Image: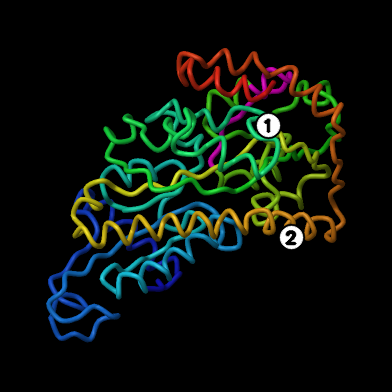
Amino acid sequence: MKHLSTHTIIGAVALSSLVLAGCGGARSGGAGGGDGDGDGDGATAGQETFSLKFSHVTTESTPKGQAAVWFEEELEEASDGRIQVEVYPNSELYGDKDEMQAIQSNSVQMLAPASAKFTTVAPAIQVLDLPFLFDSPEDIPTVAAPDTAVGEAIFANEQLEENGMKVLALWDNGFKQIHSNNKTEQPSDIEGNSYRIQPSDVLKSQIEAWGGEATPLAFAEVYNALQQGLIDGGENTYSNIESQNMHTVQEHIAESNHGYIGYILVVNQDFFDSLPEDLQQILTETAEGASEFNREGATEVNEESKRVIEEAGGTEITVWTEEQRQAFKDLVVPSVYDEYRDVIGDEIIDELLANQE
């Protein structure tokens, strides 16, 4: 179900969602809004239908944005219209500051926040923020598989369950690069500069270990902060840098691949429990399919965004050598890993450090 993306309608939807917090996704006893006439989008007369609002903060051109559109189309088809999905991208409905409250109150039924956004409700998920966690995209499904220590911290996270969220999948955005107005080739180039980070203690420790100042900011606020000189740079994937036009106000990008942005796809537990068993299975399987779609396309999307940035001609991209990358890595591995043992867990940290050897 496509929504009308006007500011008036979105503002009204957001306001009504907050007023009706806790009421959950809309449901009806018959197709097409409960009148039982059988003229709905596939659901037959007398079948209960459900409305699922899916909010996220990136544009539809990003890996998350594309996966969300795929999920919407596939779920509506697989459920024969019994679940109607409304996707709100680019912070149109909720942003970084209020999306967690929204899903816990069931004002929105699904989110896919970056792992760093869960710091306050499930600190162990900061494991995905650890620097140099993966060396290549191929490592991600192996290191973060559900049966690994890392995967269990994500998929079987008790703190998320206590806060009314059920984890369905891990989506990729890709590897982070450092963007700034000065060339970044060695740790001393970081010193004295301020960098936007997501709200994660791990990321704060990483930037500070390199000598920089870490400034947490909501994603939608980054461009203006860069343009106004409130911050000097940040770290993000090529797709996020390009889709938000950050490169137009930054002279340099260091292709560092030093960190990973993964999105935790979560659904409100009460909403999930309200679904019949067959729709629960369809929702779960569609989320898994969206993960496969996302992972296959994330690298390609970031490569295309890098090409767009290069062709724009205003930003110099410097690819780190192995020696340069190692100089940054030595300052945070194992020190930052060990700093967060009490938060993430000894078993997970030991497993990750063993993989680094």
32 lies above or below 75: below
Asked whether 208 falls inside the magenta stretch, the response is yes
Q: Is residue 8 left or right of residue 84?
A: right
- What is the number of the mark on residue 226? none
- Judging by the rendered image, the residue that carries numbered circle 1 is 195
The mark tally for this picture is 2
Report the quarter where the C terminus lies. Answer: top right
Give coordinates of residue 224: x percent, y percent.
Answer: 64, 46
Question: Which kind of residue does numbered mark 1 sit on?
Answer: Tyr
Q: Residue at x 83, y 44 (%)?
A: 251
Around disc 1, counting alpha carbons within 10 Å, would you say few (fewer than 14), some (14 to 19), or many (20 or more)?
A: many
Asked whether 188 falls inside the magenta stretch, the response is no
118 lies above or below 99: above
93 lies above or below 332: below
Q: Quadrant of residue 328?
A: top right
- What is the number of the mark on residue 304? 2
The reply to whether the C-beta atoms of the residues labelled 1 and 2 are less than 8 Å apart is no
Report the quarter where the N terminus lies. Answer: bottom left
Q: Is residue 340 left or right of residue 323?
A: left
Q: Residue at x 37, y 68 (%)?
A: 9
Around disc 2, counting alpha carbons within 10 Å, would you say few (fewer than 14), some (14 to 19), or many (20 or more)?
A: some
Give coordinates of residue 167: x percent, y percent.
Answer: 37, 43
Question: Please, what secondary structure does the residue beneath circle 2 have?
Answer: helix
Task: Using the image as rendered, state which of residue 169 and residue 37 is in the foreground.
Answer: 169
Question: Which kind of residue does numbered mark 2 sit on?
Answer: Glu
Q: CA distance from mark 1 to mark 2?
A: 25 Å
Sequence-wise first label, 1 or 2: 1
Specify start and end residues of the magenta stretch as a single range. Answer: 206-218
